Amino acid sequence: MHFALSEDQVLVQDAARGFAAGRLKPHAAEWDETKHFPVDVLREAAQMGFAGIYTGPEHGGSGMTRLDAAIIFEELARGCVSTAAYISIHNMCAWMIDTWGSDEQKARFIPPLMTMQTLASYCLTEPGSGSDAAALRTKAVKDGDDYVLNGSKAFISGAGVSDVYIVMARTGGEGPKGVSAFIVEKGMKGLSFGANEKKMGWNSQPTAMVIFEDCRVPAANRLGEEGIGFKIAMNGLNGGRINIGACALGGAVEAFETAREYVATRKQFGKAIGAFQATQFKLADMATALEASRLMLYRAASSLDAKSPEAPKLCAMAKRFSTDQSFDVANQALQLHGGYGYLKDYPLERIVRDLRVHQILEGTNEIMRVIIAKDVMK
């Protein structure tokens, strides 16, 4: 059992940290304020190999591990949580095509995804099925060489801008075995998008409904066999939960470091507030929460790399723990700034807003507890 990063992992970590510091952090506040989706910077990230971190190298992927991805997303999120989170979703979609796609699909879709000339979105959640994802109602009916899709997806990151949508739709009966996966391309007749949602955070990426009205999708765009769509979705989310947990951790680390520097210089009652034991104890607890979160994420990522049967439980544990603890750390960092933390002059309020959704997406933390409890009680 080794807790130190390898030499290669340190190099990858340094590269991600440098990119975040140079290309994400200086612009994060502006992107949040103007709701700008920085596609040009995303493509720069792709040049660093961050568009297909654990996609195979055959079609341009980086071929790294889930542990490598966790290391990278923590560092990217220190620059901008929202932008790092979108990159994590794009990675998940590319991996799905790389894992379940046909040779033709891989050759066609993966190369432009690896440069982010093509952007990808993941479409599972619906207005009427969030946590109960297997109850999705979007239908795909076979008609000759096509499937005709009808329904809608909600809260889709990148909607309207992304070029490729990995869509879960019902081709069979009720329940998870009736769900299939499709690669739906922007511009297909019958595909449209709702207005950009007005969100608390994650403002550097668009979020909207994806609507299918007699949308014709070639059967050649079905991902995998009929009936395995829910399996594809859940397998994707195992890794997605690690990624989102790592993004939460990165945001919290940035908040912690900002607060640590602030309390060393902010003076009240004749001395720096960092000299008070109450402040020191708070920082000690925050640092412990961050370290524990990182260890749980690394453990879960390693289990996924090893294809351990425990991986789904460990991913749920790590996601639940990291996102809860990270939000709390960021909120405590804001509190240490007093009234200044509430101002947009400092990054704390943006980090807190961005991190809140991490306790909801990729499976709410209540659903994470359901997954864990099922394993514990079996």
Image (cartoon, rainbow, N blue to C red):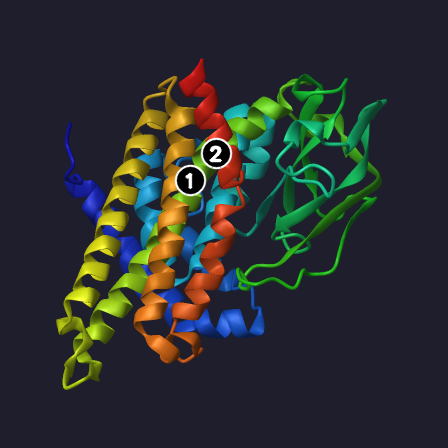
Q: Which of 221 and 93 is in front in this view?
A: 93
Quadrant of res 140: top right
Q: Nearer the viewer, residue 93 or 61?
A: 93
From what the image shows, is residue 117 above or below residue 261? above
- From the viewer's perspective, tell me whether residue 34 is left or right of residue 304: right
Q: Given contact means CB atoms under 8 Å apart, are the residues at marks 2 and 1 in contact?
A: yes
Mark closest to the chain's N terminus, 2 or 1: 1
Residue 145 percent across, percent down from the top left: 81, 24
> Distance from label 2 to label 1 (Cα)?
6 Å
> Is residue 145 in view?
yes
Residue type at tag 2: Met
Q: Which residue is drawn at 36% across and 44% down?
A: 322
- From the viewer's perspective, tell me whether residue 83 is left or right of residue 181: left
Residue type at tag 1: Arg
Q: Name the residue under label 1.
A: 320
Q: Which of 219 and 83 is in front in this view?
A: 83
Which of the labelled discs sits on residue 368, or is there none? 2
> Is residue 53 in view?
no
Q: Which residue is drawn at 79% across and 30% down?
A: 139
